[in-house]
Amino acid sequence: MPELILASTSPYRRSLLERLGIPFTALPPQTAEDPLPGELPPDRALRLAVAKAQAIASHRTNTVVIGSDQVAAVGSKVLDKPGDAARCRAQLTAASGSSARFHTACAVIAPQAGIRMVHIDTTTVFFRSLTSQEIDRYVEREHPFDCAGGFRAEGLGISLFESIESRDPTAIIGLPLIWLASALRRAGFDLP
């Protein structure tokens, strides 16, 4: 059985992949994540997921490498990881009363076996109208500075929404496990 590698430093993606019960190694992909001029959010997510997987697969033989990336946007404005409280508050204020689309891309690459599978899942999050006090309390309690959009749907961030539309509830956290489980079965891994 080939070695399974997650091309990611994200603790959220590692935690999600652990749910499948397959031993894996997580390695940093060392890829630049800058957007290309005029690049649409889903295209950026897919390009980066493939680039991350390829960055690891090109140096390792007999591996199956998973790459993933997520790009969120409110309208045409991309919501990156805020990095600090001020940017987090600004992103949540912009999203208040609006919807945001989270494009979560995943690539599975096994060069030795000639496998290259890609997928993109789009989740739409409908934010309720948020007061500045609610935003301040949320940011203070959860510190979601390393999350696209500035919230954690798997945590207290769920209280910010009216609803979520998704084919895969794990995609918004960063790794679409429904598709990934199918892809890994096609790559030869035993999953129920």
Image (cartoon, rainbow, N blue to C red):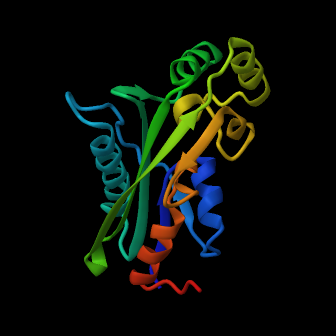
- Determine the residue positioned at 43% across, 53% down: 68
Residue at 39% of width from left, 82% of height from top? 186
> Which sits in the foreground, 177 or 161?
161
Counting from the top left corner in percent of width and height, residue 78 is at 39, 28
* Res. 179 image quadrant: bottom left
Q: Residue at x 53, y 21 (%)?
A: 91
Residue 98 vs residue 22, the one in the foreground = 98
Q: In screen coordinates, is 98 left or right of 39?
A: right
The total of numbered circles placed on residues is: 0
Say which quadrant the C terminus sits in.
bottom right
Outermost residue toward the left in this view: 38
Name the foreground residue: 186 vs 152.
Answer: 152
Q: Residue 73's x, y, as percent?
A: 41, 32
In the figure, is residue 158 to the left or right of 48? Answer: right
- Tell me the residue at 46%/29% (across/down): 80
| Position in image of residue 159 (x %, y %) | 72, 36
Quarter of the view holding residue 141: top right
**Left or right: 71 with respect to 87?**
left
Horizontal and vertical percent position of residue 185: 46, 82
